Image (cartoon, helix red, strand yellow):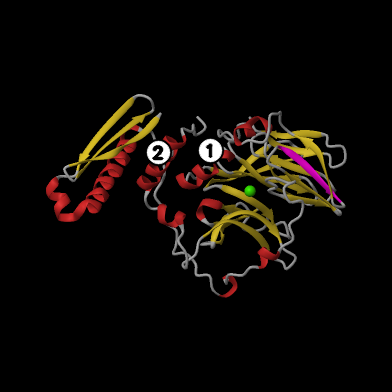
Amino acid sequence: NSHEILLSSEFQGCKVVRFIFEFQSKWSLQIVVICGWHLCCRFKVVVGTCFTLFLAVAALLAAVWIFVDSPIEPLSFRYPDCPSLVGPLNLNDKLQHAEHLFEGKLVGAESIATIGDIFYTGTADGKIIKIDNGKLSTIATLGTPPCGQPEHEPNCGRPLGLCASALGKLFVVDAYLGVFEVDPNTGETAVLVPATLMVEGQKFGFLNDLTILDNGSKIYFTDSSSRWQRQHNCFLVMEGTCDGRLLEYDVNTKITHVLLSGLCFANGVELSPAEDHILVCETTMARIIRYYIKGKKKGQHEVFAENLPGLPDNISPSSFGGYWVGLATVRSREAFSIVDLLAPHPWLKKLMFKVHIQYTHSEHKAIP
Ligand SMILES: [Ca+2]
């Protein structure tokens, strides 16, 4: 793959520019653009050059559009108008003053579980880390090395969601490998739901987060998509695929059921304090869904919070009776929001991703 722009040359005051583009090592395209004498006279050389460049870029984009396959098949949708960052959403700098713990030592820590005063988290290099009295130690790894690069993730594993039960057991969902119970002291691991399991006819692609009943009898977890893996989370958001699921694993029967399907990037999941419903962050749609597991509405779901000022990731209960929700990007009326701009224009998203893969020479494919 190569792309080359041969420099322009002057000919009687006119610009002659030749562009050569090669696509996928199969096709090449040559464009010779001549800014004619009369054009030079009327708009001067600088305008002529701009026009030439505009033509060249347009031709290049047209060639990319024709010859490069799009890795995504985006859907068209619209968000509600972005919320205004006023009142409780007023910008502040509180997080800028947060203390940075273990800087550079915990790369990609996504979720935190606590048992007593001990913290547990999972890192980008596939480790489950114990943080005891300020000391870090690796208690378990779920996959096999090498680790550390995005392309290693499918084998190395990426422990994304961690949750401790009231009985002091530690549970981990790995984006690529499945749902595990991990002994918080010895690090011994046992797989509860392998990622290879097909549940109700659909495979797992991107396991994300989990929560567990206080009595430890049921684990609720999310699969963000069966089409895109974690390393392609950006592709999942941009495509707008809605094949995410909320699932329930019965610890006693060892059976996994689907509670909710058709979610657009199912992400963080959390039980309510009364354990009568579950909240699921639907990242792509900037909203949170409530699914009832008890009471009159058992089995039903509804929107709990919508048009969030960003795309929600994980969710945890706060000590005030509400929830903390991490937002992966900002959506606001006061600033430019790329996800809102692109959502109704699938062709524009396709073009961007075609250019991206053409210029990075990267292989990004959905799960077959
Ligand atoms: Ca997450």
Secondary structure category for the residue under label 2:
helix
Q: In percent of the image, x 76 and y 34: which residue is there?
A: 141
The magenta region covers 126-132
Quarter of the image with the N terminus is: top left
Q: Residues within 10 Å of mark 2 (few under 14, many from 20)?
A: many
Residue 280 position within the rendered picture, expressed as x and y whole percent measured from the top left: 61, 53
Task: Pick whichever, 284 or 31, lies toward us.
Answer: 31
Corner quadrant of residue 190? top right
User: Residue 213 — which label?
Assistant: none
Say left or right for 43 vs 195. Answer: left
Q: In percent of the image, x 68 and y 41: which residue is there?
A: 124
Q: CA distance from mark 2 to mark 1?
A: 17 Å
Give the prevailing secondary structure in the magenta stretch: strand
Q: Let me know if residue 71 appears in the view.
A: no
Q: In percent of the image, x 76 and y 43: which residue is there?
A: 171
Say left or right for 194 vs 120. Answer: left
Q: What residue type is disc 2 on?
A: Lys
Say left or right for 305 vs 140. Answer: left
Residue 311 position within the rendered picture, expressed as x and y whole percent measured from the top left: 55, 55
Q: Which residue is mark 1?
A: 228
Foreground mark, 2 or 1, reads: 2
Residue farthest to the bottom, as pictured: 87
Q: Let me know if residue 129 appears in the view.
A: yes
Task: Pick whichever, 11 or 171, lies toward us.
Answer: 11
Does the segment drawn in magenta span residue 270?
A: no
